[in-house]
Amino acid sequence: MARVIIIGCGGVATVGITKCCQHPEVFEEIMIASRTKSKCDALAEKLRPTTKTVIHTTAIDAGDVNQVIALIKEFKADMVMHLGMPFHNLVIMDACLECKIHYLDTAEYEPEDVDEPVWRARYEKRVKELGFSAYFDYSYQWEYRERFEKIGKIALLGCGFDPGVTQAYVAYAKKHYFDEIEYIDILDCNGGDHGYKFATNFNPEINLREVSSPGAYYENGKWHTIAPMSIMHPYDFDEVGVKNMYLLHHEETESIARWFPEVKRIRFYMSFGDSYIQHMNCLQDVGMLRTDPVMYNGVEITPIQFLKALLPDPATLGPRTVGKTNIGCICRGKKDGKPVSYYIYNVCDHQESYKETGSQAISYTTGTPAMCGAMMVLTGKWTKPGARTCDEYDPDPFIDALNKYGLPTRENFNPKMIDDSYDNL
């Protein structure tokens, strides 16, 4: 039915590619494209005996728009699924515009070099005007909305779990259970244990930037910034247990604030163990999370990239990670004038994820929604063109696909609320 280029061959991409190959009726042919062709070849060789999807491989520099355009034209692609680094989002979107095809990614654009002068000036302006200081934000990709509308194609932004499924969860809650949603708490708990004293479950460069940055929440029409990891609440997660979770800034809070203007407050929490916090704080204190180059023995290195080379590769964590994730949204508001509370979430098992796809649950909960989102676009379930997020579309067929293909939805109509008092650590 469709010819799809999938850029990336890490943990998330491996899951996305594997799940696409389970549905050859939609993904008739795929091209796996990554900087390292040998990784693409190894995955293709593993999957070919299991699928009717025709698999091709190639090497590509995803930061080179001309290479991406040439590949799209040569392969005659209907869509590019970008499951690699968000640094290249804009380049690949430009290529898709030029070739008039659909686009999908799993995370907001952010620059690799956060000290580049033009980007930095715009960033400082946004921090001053809006109040949150994360390096990622939707504004760059939302600027592509009208250009994709004009060519009649969809650029589906941030179609992982969070962002992605969490936005669809809010849209689903609003459609089925609320006249208006007033308060939203998004909870991301990884109860897995990989056995290392310190490792990250996805790309260390992205993960550590995100976690070490100031947090932010949206309340009464404004963004409020807090010191990194300065607000913590314990929460008892279904099938995981009690975990400490910390308030962070995250992508989906931006789109939800935009598309659900009646919401009074949106917060995002992620759980971390004490060992992770201690290691991260130490690395931050000694400068290992710096993103600017430094000179060492006459060689220019970037500390966080050097650290990435020292840490375990997230793609290798699957065999040794046990436990479960629990990710979802608690919504409060009104229906027919009466107060309503509702918790929609998913529980995913690390070892079951590994058995199916060779990757742990963090990659599984990102790669599977990417496949489902691509399926929505390619089968015509989602048709509104433009650069859009998952909360702008009918959530029902997407939720149905998640239920069928590995991430079943759970509901709680009397959830425990997050304590509204902020306990600074």
Image (cartoon, rainbow, N blue to C red):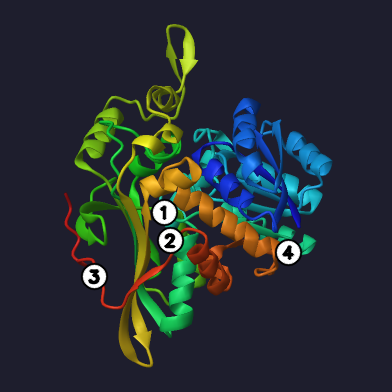
Proximity of marks 1 and 2: CB atoms separated by less than 8 Å: yes
Q: Amino acid at mark 1?
A: His
Quadrant location of the N terminus?
bottom right
Residue 321, horizontal then vertical, whole percent: 33, 40
The residue carrying pointer 4 sits among few (fewer than 14), some (14 to 19) or many (20 or more) residues within 10 Å by Cα, namely some
Q: Position of residue 159 (x, y in %)?
A: 54, 56
The kind of residue on which mark 2 rests is Thr
Tag 4: amino acid: Glu
Instruction: State the SS at label 1.
Output: loop
Rendered image: mark on residue 417: 3
Q: Are marks 1 and 3 in contact (CB under 8 Å)?
A: no
Q: Is residue 339 positioned above or below 32 on the image? A: below
Which label's residue is closer to the chain start, 1 or 3?
A: 1
Residue under numbered circle 2: 253
Q: Quadrant of residue 176?
A: bottom left
Residue 201 got which mark? Answer: none
Question: What residue would you read off at disc 1?
Answer: 250
